[in-house]
Image: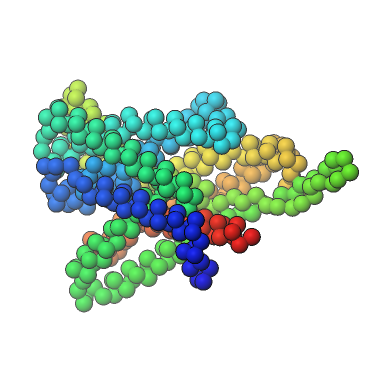
Amino acid sequence: MTRWFSIFKIPDLRRKLFIVGGILVVSRLLASIPIPNIDITQLRAFLESSQLLGFLNLLSGSTLENFSIAMLGVGPYITATIIMQLLTMIFPRLKELYYEEGEAGRRRFNRLSRFITVPLSAIQAYGLLNLLTAQGVIPRLSLSVLLWDVVIITAGSMLLLWLGDLITEQKIGNGISFLIFAGIVSGVPSFIQQTIASYSPQNLPVYIAFIILAVLVIAGVIFITEGERKVPVSYAKRVRGMKLYGGASSYLPLRVNQAGVIPIIFAISLLLFPQFAAQILAIFSPDLSLRMTNFVNSVLGNQLIYGFIYFFLVFVFTYFYTAVVFDPQEISKNLQRSGGFILGIRPGEPTGQFLQKIISRTTLFGAIFLGIIAILPIFTQYLTGVSTLTLGGTALLIVVSVALEIRNQIESQLAIRNY
C-alpha cells in the first residue's frame, strides 16, 4: 500500500495521472451534451427493455442513454479493429504489416483502422437514428436534420477516439479501455440509487444472494483473466567468437482467455446487424424493412432464444478470434529462429501442432466462461426477479480487466524507477 502512495511522490507519474483524470472528465462532459429535441426519459426506458441496445449503451460508455453527441462512443473503432483483424486472414499483406513489420507496421495498421472508423460511424449513426425513429423513441427527422445529426455523431466518436489516443500516450493503460471503464463506473451511483429505491424487507435474502453472486463473479473474472498455461521453452547454446550465448530457460504464456472481451462485442454486433440493416433497407423498401424489423424483434424478444443464440455466437467467436490473433505456426517459426525449442518436441511444424493442441484445450474454458458472462444478466434477472438487480457480467469483465491492466502498467513503471 505504501508503494502505491509513492505514485504521487514521483512528478512524472503524478503528472500522467492528472492528465488522464482531466481527459476522463472531458469525455464525461461530452457524454452529457445531448442532441436537442429528444425525450431522454423515453429513450432510457427503451434501452432498458432491449438487451442488445443496452449492451451498445455499455460499450459506448453510457453515452447512448443521454443521446449525446458522442452517443456511439468508441464502438465504431472497435468494430473497425475487428474487421481489420479479420482481413489479415484474407490479405497476406495486412498480415505482414501487423505481425512482421514491428511497431511501424502496427502504427500503419491502426491508421487504416481509423480511416475505416469514419464511414462505420456514419453508417451506425444513420441506422441507429432510423431504428429509434421506427420504434417511436424519437420524432421523425427531416433529411437535412438527419444528415446533420449523423455528421455530429460521427465527429463525436472521432473526438472520443482522439481522447483515447491521448490517454494511451501516457502509458498507464489503453485509452479506449479507459473510456469504456469510466463510462461503466459512472453508472454505479445510479445503479445503487435504483437498488435502494426498490428495496423491500421481503427481498433481503435476494439482495444478500446477489451480493454473494457478484463477489463470486468478480473472483471468477480475475481468476480466468489472469489464468495462463506456461509452456517451458529452452534455448540452445551458441558460440560467437570467444563467448557462449543461450542455454537459458523460459516459458511461453498461453492465456486461458486469449480473446478478451472481443468475442462478446463481435457477437452483439452480429445480433444488432439485422436491425440496422432493416433500417437502411427502409430507403429502398419501407414495407420489407417493417416486416424484417418485426421478425427480428419477435425472435430476439424471446429471452430463451436470445440467450441461446448469444451464448453460441460468443463461444464460436472466441475460437475464431483466438485463431486470428494466435498463430501457432508463426510462433513456432519465431522460436526456431531464436534458437528456442520445447523439450520433447521437434522444432518447426511439430511445435506448431503441439501449441495448437494446447490452445484448443485452454480456449474451451475461455469460450465457456465468456458465454456464461454474456448471458449472466438474463440469468440474474430470472433468478432474483428484481429488474434492478441485473448483474452485468460483461461490465464486470471490462472493469476488472482494465483495472488489472492499469495495475500492471503502474507497477512496471514503479519497478523501473526503483531499479
**Relative to 305, does residue 101 appear above or below in the rendering?**
above
191 relative to 303, above or below: below
How far across and down, in percent of the image, does residue 28 sit?
A: 29, 51
In percent of width and height, residue 145 lies at 15, 31
Q: Give above or below for 173 relative to 120.
A: below
Residue 154 appears in the picture as rendered: yes
Q: Residue furthest right?
A: 242
Q: Quadrant of residue 113?
A: top left
Which of the colour schemes (rainbow, by chain, secondary structure, one colour) is used? Answer: rainbow
The front one of 263 and 114 is 114
Which of these two is toward me, 271 or 123? 123
Residue closest to the far top: 284
The single residue placed furthest to the front in the displayed view is: 11
Residue 338, x across and y down, in percent: 73, 40
**Quadrant of the image occupied by residue 272:** top left
Above-or-below relation of 403 to 198: above
Left or right: where does residue 399 sit relative to residue 251? left
Q: How many marks?
A: 0
Camera-side residue of 120 and 305? 120
Which residue is pictured at 33% across the width and 37% down the height?
158
Answer with left or right where residue 228 lies relative to residue 85.
right
> Measuring 19% from the left and 51% from the top, which residue is drawn there?
44
What residue sits 18% from the left and 42% below the top?
35
Residue 56's x, y, as percent?
30, 45
Q: Residue at x 31, y 43 (%)?
A: 73
